Image (cartoon, rainbow, N blue to C red):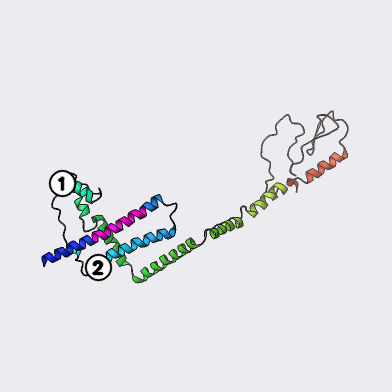
Amino acid sequence: MQQREEKLLEASVESLISRVAHLKNALHSFIYKLENEYERLTWPSVLDNFALLSGQLNTINKLLRNEKTPSFRQQVIIPLLLSPDRDEELAKLTEQRVPVFSHEIVPDHLRTKPDPEVEEQEKQLSAEAARIGPEVAQKQIQTLNKLCSNLLEKLNNPRDDRDAESAAIRQNKPSFNTADTNALVAAVGFGKGLSKCRPPGPVAPGHPGQGPMMSGGPTLQQVTIGGGSGQQQGMGPGAPQQQGQAGKMPSNIKTNIKAASSMHPYNR
């Protein structure tokens, strides 16, 4: 009876090793294509490779769940020899992944449970999941499904549609403020909103024709008369005429000056 179980276990292990070898070769082939033939690789070919890997994994699961397959969980593996020296036969069997079977490597390769830190995190997650009620869990599931549906909808939309929507948004979005533009135009063209007070300070000497600022607002200070060279007439209220002025000011210049003074923004 014991010999029969040993033979059955040996045959099951050999079959499992063969299936895993096929899966490993398929993975190597797929990785090679991704790294070296990605320019010629098409999406249907990628799906075919995934389907092949999925089928091989399902075959291994069926083999493990078969009634004739002995339970590997009940088998115990005991290391008979530990050595810090390199083992060429072990390196060949493991494809140079495990060249030494020492005290450092054994706990990792023969571990039957997760690391203590990982196990503690799993316990915390299980406790948090147990504290959540069915209604809260259902709401969270619905929210997650809604987010996933929106994300899938955006991903499934053609790129041209997204580019068109982005362009439409950029065109319709105003790049200026109408109220600020109107205020700026009113201030420049009509002096709206500007202060009527002149900054304090004495008038610099040596500038004839600049009289004191009157309460009625600023007026045109100087004008050059074409009849004389370099002769200026002060136009401020009450400013005396300069000596040596040749003749009186023409009437058309007076009219233009009065018109310009009345159109100044501060005098409106």
190 and 1: which is toward the camera: 1
Q: Looking at the rendered structure, which numbered label has been put on residue 252?
A: none
Q: Horizontally, is 33 left or right of 239 in the view?
A: left
The number of numbered discs placed on residues in the rendered structure image is 2
265 and 40: which is toward the camera: 40
Residue at the extreme bottom: 135
x, y percent for residue 87: 18, 46
Specify start and end residues of the magenta stretch as a single range. 16-31
Mark 1 or mark 2: which comes first in sequence?
2
Residue in view at x 33 percent, y 70 percent: 133
Looking at the rendering, which quadrant does residue 13 occupy?
A: bottom left
Q: Horizontally, is 44 left or right of 228 in the view?
A: left
x, y percent for residue 248: 88, 34
Is residue 192 visible from the viewing direction of this image?
A: no
According to the picture, the residue beneath numbered tag 2 turns out to be 65
User: Is residue 18 inside the magenta stretch?
Assistant: yes
User: Is residue 97 inside the magenta stretch?
Assistant: no
Secondary structure, mark 2, is helix
Give above or below for 239 relative to 17: above
Give above or below for 25 relative to 242: below
According to the picture, the residue beneath numbered tag 1 turns out to be 83
Looking at the rendering, which quadrant does residue 220 occupy?
A: top right
Predominant SS along the magenta part: helix
Give above or below for 241 relative to 56: above
Give above or below for 200 relative to 40: above
Kind of residue indicated by mark 2: Arg
Residue in view at x 42 percent, y 66 percent: 145
x, y percent for residue 73: 19, 63
